[in-house]
Image (tube, rainbow, N blue to C red):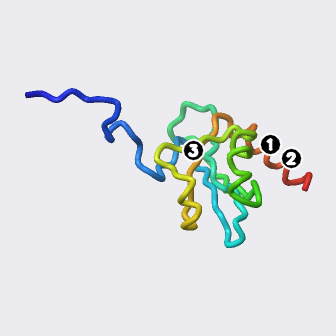
Amino acid sequence: MMHSSTISEPAQLMQKGTLYMDYGLWLLSDETGRITLTGWSETGSDSTDPNATTRTDHWPTYPLCDDRAQLPARLQELGLDLAPGADLNDLDRAWDVYVRHPDLTALRAALDRQKTAR
């Protein structure tokens, strides 16, 4: 007897902590409850040459909010979504919580503007 696959099966989900394509972004919480965002992104050229140079850019730590109550609004404001399998409750364990964004250039520009405005 063959079993058909359904959407609810775990095989359809990505593993927790998987980094997406050419970047990784994650939330961190410190001992005071302050939440920050950091990550890395990989930039390359438009060349079709497989030996073309890519550069990994490690992001600074950006302050997002002073406590968890403010976090949902900040994530929405910045257009950040939780990565599949990510759980905000992991912040309570001091674990990384992975997030994703459709436009890294726009996200980083917004974070840099907010950082200099503080």
- Left or right of 84: which side holds 76? right
Asked if 41 appears above or below 12 in the picture, the reply is below
Residue found at x 64% / y 54%: 39
For the residues labelled 1 and 3, say whether their Cβ atoms are less than 8 Å apart.
Answer: no
- What residue is disc 2 on? 113
Q: Amino acid at mark 3?
A: Leu
Q: Earlier in the sequence, mark 1 or mark 3?
A: 3
Q: Quadrant of the N terminus?
A: top left
User: Could you say where residue 54 lies in the image, as x and y percent from the top left?
Assistant: 60, 46
Q: Amino acid at mark 1?
A: Ala
User: Could you say where residue 114 lies in the image, as x and y percent from the top left?
Assistant: 85, 49
Residue found at x 51% / y 50%: 86
Considering depth in this image, is 59 or 49 the residue closer to the camera?
A: 59
User: Could you say where residue 69 lies in the image, as x and y percent from the top left?
Assistant: 71, 54
The CA span between labels 1 and 3 is 20 Å
The CA span between labels 3 and 2 is 23 Å
- What residue is disc 3 on? 82
Packing grade of label 3 (10 A; few <14, some 14-19, many >=20) is: some
Q: Nearer the viewer, mark 1 or mark 3?
A: 3
Q: Quadrant of the C terminus?
A: bottom right
Q: Amino acid at mark 2?
A: Arg
Residue found at x 34% / y 34%: 8
- What residue is disc 1 on? 109
For the residues labelled 2 and 1, say whether their Cβ atoms are less than 8 Å apart.
Answer: yes
- Left or right of 72: which side holds 48? left
Q: Earlier in the sequence, mark 3 or mark 2?
A: 3
Q: Secondary structure at mark 2?
A: helix
